[in-house]
Image (spheres, rainbow, N blue to C red):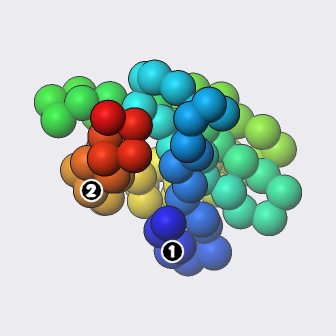
Amino acid sequence: MLREHGFAVRIYLPPREHRPPQVHVVRGRGEVKIHLGTESAPPTVERVFQMRDADVVRAYRIVLEHHAELLDKWRQLHG
């Protein structure tokens, strides 16, 4: 869906994915799951899988930069 600086931001579809709105950011074998929050609440890191701390920070910044569009896309896909 979104690729930036070697990171791929993914939104999975039902039935694999569920509420709350979230994305998975992948780089190499690492992945971070980030809850998108709301228009007034920022994203939060939910879980990290084999990703270096510095890459988690970069992934979070990408999600934060594209927060509104990612939240909108998640809602389009999930209703």
The residue sitting at 53% across, 73% down in the picture is: 3
Identify the element where label 2 is drawn.
helix
Q: Which residue is mark 1?
A: 4
Q: Is residue 49 left or right of residue 32?
A: right
| Image position of 79 (left or right of 41) | right
Q: Which residue lies at the image location 47% right of the left edge and 36% below the top edge?
A: 22
In the image, what residue type sits under mark 1? Glu
Q: Which residue, given by chain and number where applicable, does mark 2 sit on? A: 69
Eyeballing the image, is 71 above or below 8?
Answer: above
Question: In the shown orientation, is residue 9 left or right of residue 19?
Answer: right
Q: Residue at horizontal 39%, vertical 46%?
A: 77
* Residue placed most toward the observer, 71 or 43: 71
Percent coordinates x, y for residue 51 in the rendering: 75, 48
Say few, some or many: other residues with alpha carbon within 10 Å of mark 1 (under 14 / 14 to 19 / 20 or more).
few
Is 36 displayed left or right of 72 in the figure?
Answer: right
Could you tell me which residue is drawn at 43 percent across and 59 percent down? 62
Q: Nearer the viewer, residue 77 or 29?
A: 77
Residue 27 position by quadrant: bottom right
Question: Farthest residue in the bottom direction?
Answer: 5
- The earlier-in-sequence mark between 2 and 1 is 1
Which quarter of the figure has residue 10? bottom right
Q: Would you call the spot at circle 2 few (<14 residues within 10 Å), some (14-19), or many (20 or more)?
A: few
Name the spot of residue 53 as percent of width and height, x first.
Answer: 67, 46
Cα–Cα gap, marks 2 and 1:
15 Å
The C terminus: image quadrant: top left
| Callout 2 amino acid | Glu
Find numbered disc 1 in the image and state the secondary structure of the residue it sits on: strand
Residue 20: percent from the left, percent from the top? Answer: 43, 23
Whether residue 64 is visible: no
